[in-house]
Image (cartoon, rainbow, N blue to C red):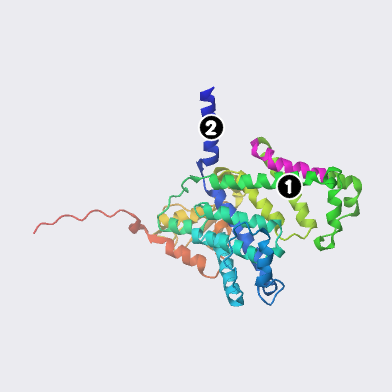
């Protein structure tokens, strides 16, 4: 019995605190960083109204609103500073941090700045926050404590290019990823708990009330959607899906179907109700239920479906890609659609061949590599990357040791 207990505890410890691929955390960083960047750009439209002394919530009013829970410590670098110039500079710094987080540039510093900046902006004006903002704040903390730049990041591409990183990312602690999973479970479980306390969720009429609030209106739906049978169905279906997302999602045979149900639920909410980025934030956490190896394998399987778009790229005659640039280009091609032989080509220029022997320009490589999409469209960047990665064939060969001479 004791041996069985020890074995269970060992497996539980490995599952929670074990090591694995950082790919999932890298994808999660891209999604959350992008959503944070979009969120702050949306706020920029009314920045003066929400974060300056000339707006609806001057500093004193914001501090009074935040002091309702005075016994709880709060992180707010904007506390007591009414200067509009400082507020705008601080806001711009947070926007830059969100962008750098999304692309994975200076990842450790960027994620910490994003976390501290997001918390400070939220504490500066809590009147405009909703559940999606609260979740964003929590996610930035997970990014700050996780090895977020270990995969799918510009930092890693630079290290690969310089030959300072292996082709396969080293294993990292999965504890931050587990925290994200538990965050999902806690959010949905407490949601069901509080909903069940109220009468409208138990009697099956709760989903009728929100569509009657005009400030949440977005896109029209047929009238039968608000009929009593449909209202009862959507009310109880919401409770069932949310409870499954708090429990059954941890059971792998049911995981896919539970997460798919969650995507449908939040897709309906996003279509019908105007709650900015809420559905996207909730669904972004679902990726945490898949290990990095599973995410990598999924991209490879997807690449098999698009194998007719595969390319064989041959370098110019007498030239070849250096080891570092080759690894970097391979890393931005998760679908494995581009093959670059190590031997130099026979033509004087780059030669890009399709599976049906058609010839394309070097730009076709960037269109196949997902990691190149955010930046390869900038004029001259892709060609410059290819040129800098080339070395002469003779330079890649080990040079013989010089013969000793005697005087």
User: Which range of residues does the magenta coloring cover?
Assistant: 234-252
Return the residue found at the far left. Answer: 407
Return the residue found at the far top. Answer: 1
Question: Percent x, y for residue 218?
Answer: 81, 61
Tell me if 122 is positioned left or right of 348 in this view.
Answer: right
The one of 66 and 222 positioned closer to us in this rendering: 66
What residue did someone put label 2 on? 9
Residue 62 visible in the current orientation: yes
Circle 1 sits in a helix, a strand or a loop, which is it? helix
Tell whether label 1 touches label 2 (CB within 8 Å): no
Vertical arrangement, residue 77 with respect to residue 302, above or below: below
What residue did someone put label 1 on? 191
What crowding class fits label 2: few (fewer than 14 Cα within 10 Å), some (14-19), or many (20 or more)?
A: few
Question: Percent x, y for residue 241?
Answer: 75, 43
Question: Percent x, y for residue 279?
Answer: 71, 54
Vertical arrangement, residue 105 with respect to residue 252, above or below: below
Q: Identify the image quadrant of the C terminus.
A: bottom left
Circle 2 sits in a helix, a strand or a loop, which is it? helix
Q: Residue at x 42, y 52 (%)?
A: 165
Query: Nearer the N terminus, badge 2 or badge 1?
Result: 2
Magenta span contains residue 239:
yes
Magenta span contains residue 263:
no
Q: Residue at x 13, y 57 (%)?
A: 405
Q: Identify the image quadrant of the N terminus.
A: top right
The one of 50 and 34 positioned closer to us in this rendering: 50
Q: Residue at x 58, y 61 (%)?
A: 75
């Amino acid at each position: 019995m004791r041996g069985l207990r020890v074995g269970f505890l060992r497996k539980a410890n490995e599952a929670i605190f074990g090591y694995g691929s950082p790919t999932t955390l890298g994808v999660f960083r891209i999604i959350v960083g992008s959503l944070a960047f979009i969120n702050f750009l949306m706020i920029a439209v009314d920045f003066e109204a929400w974060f300056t002394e000339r707006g609806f919530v001057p500093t004193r009013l914001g501090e009074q609103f935040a002091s309702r829970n005075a016994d709880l410590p709060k992180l707010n670098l904007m506390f007591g500073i009414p200067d509009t110039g400082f507020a705008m500079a601080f806001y711009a710094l947070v926007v830059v941090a969100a962008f750098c987080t999304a692309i994975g540039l200076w990842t450790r510093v960027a994620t910490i700045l994003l976390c501290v900046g997001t918390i400070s902006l939220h504490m500066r004006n809590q009147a405009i926050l909703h559940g999606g903002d609260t979740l964003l704040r929590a996610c930035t903390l997970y990014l700050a404590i996780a090895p977020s730049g270990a995969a799918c990041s510009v930092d890693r591409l630079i290290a690969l290019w310089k030959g300072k990183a292996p082709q396969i990312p080293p294993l990292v602690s999965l504890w931050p990823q587990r925290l994200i999973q538990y965050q999902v479970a806690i959010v949905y479980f407490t949601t069901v708990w509080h909903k069940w306390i109220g009468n409208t969720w138990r009697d099956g009429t709760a989903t009728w009330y929100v569509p009657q609030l005009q400030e949440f209106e977005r896109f029209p739906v047929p009238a039968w959607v608000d009929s009593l049978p449909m209202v009862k169905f959507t009310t109880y279906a919401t409770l069932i899906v949310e409870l499954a997302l708090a429990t059954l999602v941890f059971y792998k045979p049911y995981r896919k179907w539970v997460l798919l149900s969650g995507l449908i639920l939040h897709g309906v909410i996003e279509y019908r109700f105007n709650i900015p980025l809420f559905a996207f934030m909730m669904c972004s956490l679902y990726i945490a239920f898949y290990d990095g190896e599973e995410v990598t394998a999924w991209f490879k399987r997807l690449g098999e479906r698009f194998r007719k778009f595969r390319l064989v790229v041959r370098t110019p005659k007498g030239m070849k890609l250096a080891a570092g640039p080759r690894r970097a280009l391979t890393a931005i091609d998760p679908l494995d659609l581009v093959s670059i032989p190590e031997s130099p080509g026979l033509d004087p220029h780059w030669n890009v061949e399709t599976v049906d022997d058609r010839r394309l320009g070097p730009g076709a490589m960037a269109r196949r590599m997902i990691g190149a999409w955010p930046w390869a469209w900038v004029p001259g960047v892709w060609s410059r990357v290819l040129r800098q990665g080339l070395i002469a064939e003779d330079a890649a060969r080990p040079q013989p040791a010089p013969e000793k001479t005697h005087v």
